[in-house]
């Protein structure tokens, strides 16, 4: 959620803490200490204000890596979708007709 917020605009730690009312400022700072060395965020300095900014470079690298595998995942999801449809059809065929709900007609409602 921190990265999603920073993708919109830079923010100070206090602004980010508002997103997580159950976390303390030190806990938010701990996240910063993990994200900054990973190269995912940078911290600027404007007088007393020290905004965090998203560093998109590493995320672009991850996106490029994932893109190489997208055809595999798309094909896998297509196969999963086909399998689930087959299960649905066979499950529907196994049900006795008496158990199947009937569609209400206009005469049934009145």
Image (cartoon, grey):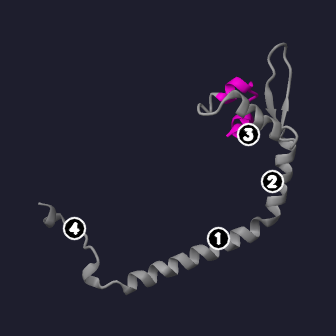
For the residues labelled 3 and 1, the Cα–Cα distance comes to 27 Å
Q: Residue 2 lies in magenta, yes or no?
A: yes
Q: 110 or 23, which lies in front?
A: 23
In which quarter of the view is residue 92 placed?
Answer: bottom left
For the residues labelled 2 and 4, the Cα–Cα distance comes to 50 Å
Q: Earlier in the sequence, mark 3 or mark 4?
A: 3
**Mark 3: few/some/many CA within 10 Å (<14, 14-19, 20+):** some
For the residues labelled 4 and 1, the Cα–Cα distance comes to 36 Å
The number of callouts visible is 4
Residue visible at 15% across and 61% down in the picture:
109
Q: Which mark is residue 77?
A: 1
Q: 27 or 56, which lies in front?
A: 27
Q: Are marks 4 and 1 in contact (CB under 8 Å)?
A: no
Image coordinates for residue 26, horizontal then vertical, percent: 73, 29
**Mark 4: few/some/many CA within 10 Å (<14, 14-19, 20+):** few
Q: Is residue 93 above or below residue 10?
A: below
Q: Which mark is residue 3?
A: 3
Q: Secondary structure at mark 1?
A: helix
Image coordinates for residue 31, horizontal then vertical, percent: 76, 38
Q: Main secondary structure of the magenta part?
A: helix
For the residues labelled 3 and 2, the Cα–Cα distance comes to 15 Å
**Mark 1: few/some/many CA within 10 Å (<14, 14-19, 20+):** few
Q: Which mark is residue 63?
A: 2
In which quarter of the view is residue 107 placed?
Answer: bottom left
């Amino acid at each position: 959620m921190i990265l999603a917020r920073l993708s919109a605009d830079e923010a100070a730690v206090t602004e980010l803490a508002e997103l997580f009312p159950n976390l303390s400022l030190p806990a938010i700072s701990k996240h910063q200490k993990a994200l900054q060395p990973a190269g995912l965020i940078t911290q600027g300095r404007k007088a007393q204000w020290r905004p965090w900014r998203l560093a998109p470079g590493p995320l672009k690298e991850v996106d490029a890596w994932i893109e190489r595998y997208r055809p595999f995942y798309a094909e896998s999801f297509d196969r999963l979708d086909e399998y689930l449809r087959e299960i649905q059809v066979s499950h529907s065929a196994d049900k006795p007709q008496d158990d199947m709900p009937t569609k209400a007609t206009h005469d049934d409602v009145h």
